[in-house]
Image (cartoon, grey):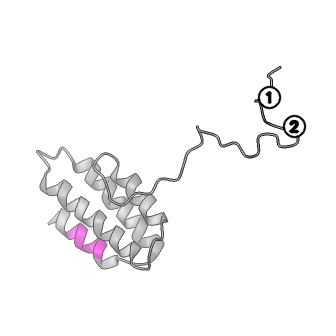
């Protein structure tokens, strides 16, 4: 049986202890290159200000534009499609940004 750490009363237990392995909420401020869809979803779930959803949608549009512009022989088409689908889902859930979604689609398809 393990001994209790010194200075810890039986009545206290481990209530004040923190688990170093438990995940801490991550605050994402920008859509990155390695996992843009996950970044977008985390950012959409955060509500820092009333303009936050519009900012996140704009950031995803910019990411999609960058993926298309910097694509070499279609190497980023899969990631671009994933980003478009995530943007579509976010716009539908928030019931905003339909014009943003259409702009992004026209740009990619055009």
Q: Residues within 10 Å of mark 2 (few under 14, many from 20)?
A: few
Secondary structure type for disc 2 = loop
Between 26 and 105, which is closer to the camera in this rendering?
26
* Residue under label 1: 4
Tell me the chief SS of the magenta region.
helix
Vertical arrangement, residue 104 with respect to residue 38, above or below: below
* Residue under label 2: 10
Range covered by the magenta-colored residues: 100-106
* Residue pictured at 47% horizontal, 53% vertical: 26
Where is residue 45 shown, x and y percent of the image? 49, 64
Magenta span includes 104: yes
Q: Is residue 84 left or right of residue 53?
A: left
Vertical arrangement, residue 44 with respect to residue 7, above or below: below
Q: Is residue 5 left or right of residue 75?
A: right
Name the quarter where the C terminus is drawn: bottom left
Where is residue 50 shown, x and y percent of the image? 44, 80
């Amino acid at each position: 049986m393990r001994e209790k750490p010194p200075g810890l009363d039986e009545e206290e237990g481990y209530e004040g202890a923190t688990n170093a392995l438990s995940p801490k909420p991550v605050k994402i401020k920008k859509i990155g290159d390695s996992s843009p869809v996950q970044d977008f979803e985390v950012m959409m779930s955060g509500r820092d200000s009333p303009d936050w959803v519009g900012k996140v949608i704009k950031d995803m549009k910019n990411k999609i534009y960058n993926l298309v512009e910097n694509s070499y022989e279609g190497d980023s088409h899969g990631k671009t499609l994933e980003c478009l689908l995530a943007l579509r889902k976010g716009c539908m859930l928030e019931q905003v940004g339909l014009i943003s979604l259409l702009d992004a689609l026209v740009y990619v398809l055009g």
